Image (cartoon, helix red, strand yellow):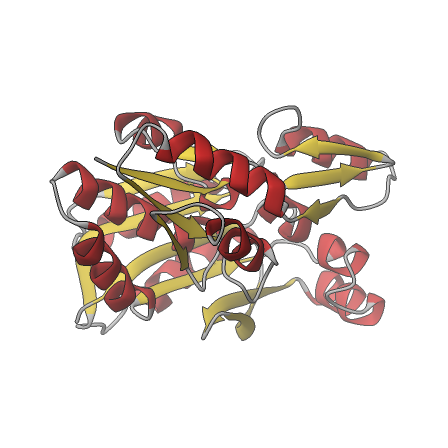
Amino acid sequence: MIKITTDSTCDLPYHLLEQYDVSVIPLGIVKGDRLYQDGINIHTEDIAAHVDAGGDITTTNAVNIADYEDLFRTMTARYDAVIHLNLGMGFSSCYQNAKLAAEEVPEVYVVDSANLTVGHGILVLAAAEAAAAGKTVSEILAMLEDMVSRVETSFVLDRLDYMKKGGRCSSVTALGANLLKLHPCVEVIDGKMSVTKKYRGSMEKVLAEYVRDRLAGRTDIDTKRVFLVDTCRTPGLVDVARKALLADGRFEEIVESQAGCTIFCHCGPDTLGLVYLRKK
């Protein structure tokens, strides 16, 4: 049997992780002078309360080599092989650490998702489905290699103060965006984040426009499944995006998921994104 493992940044809903017996190793979250484990002893509401009270932005820590090695040794004692899917190497050293750990443990295969949140998770789910269907290691790795470049991940931010506190944008940029009610659309391209568009207005208006923009006139989208991932605290925002997806009507399945602490640290509340595959 093949075991699928992954980082907490995959942001897949718990019921899917449980259904396919996917083991998740948490990234570290640093709040104040204490190290927490993503989704274990710290959650997004804890980070939001800390920042709202004037606290410094929380930061993230990659999983270390020793923890990966412990995970891999535990799983290879019970399974024929382990395939571990990492948060993209452009965002963290998790992939490099997992690769070094895998050198010490036979039959462990590490895959760079080149993505984040459910852009990473969509690959985890595909690997887990393939493993459950009895595919071999080589078949699953070939499938993932084909899929990585076809994952389309984008999201819209409501506010930039988390990005500013984390050093990912300037104070002037954040202030200007807030004054003008600008909401950047960020897309993962070639393993890196890029701002591809800026929306203006209320988040309700922006999210409806964003979903339409991502899908309008597209004939290259694999319509089997779309992920709707968010950090929304404002009531109704997810409903707006869901309604726009349902109005489009092309997707066989809409999977909704909440982004975890690692993503929340950088994006803050009321961020929402879409993830799907492009056709071959």
Q: Is residue 277 left or right of residue 232?
A: left
On the image, the x and y values in percent for residue 218 come to: 22, 72
> What residue lies at 36% left-to-right and 56% top-to-bottom?
275
> What residue lies at 45% left-to-right and 41% top-to-bottom?
11
Q: Is residue 30 left or right of residue 271?
A: right
User: Is residue 108 in sight in this rendering?
Assistant: yes
Please name whichever residue, 137 or 115, is drawn nearer the observer in this view of the structure. 137
> What residue lies at 28% left-to-right and 51% top-to-bottom?
226
User: Residue 150 falls in which quadrant of the image?
Assistant: bottom left
Q: Is residue 79 above or below residue 129?
A: above
User: Residue 74 falls in which quadrant of the image?
Assistant: top left
On the image, the x and y values in percent for residue 228 come to: 38, 46
User: Is residue 260 in sight in this rendering?
Assistant: no
Looking at the rendered image, the quarter that the N terminus falls into is top left
> What residue lies at 79% left-to-right and 46% top-to-bottom?
57
Q: Is residue 195 above or below residue 131?
A: below
Please name whichever residue, 204 or 132, is drawn nearer the observer in this view of the structure. 132
Please name whichever residue, 169 or 84, is drawn nearer the observer in this view of the structure. 84
How many discs appear?
A: 0
Q: Is residue 150 above or below residue 47?
A: below
Please name whichever residue, 147 or 258, is drawn nearer the observer in this view of the structure. 147
On the image, the x and y values in percent for residue 55 come to: 86, 39
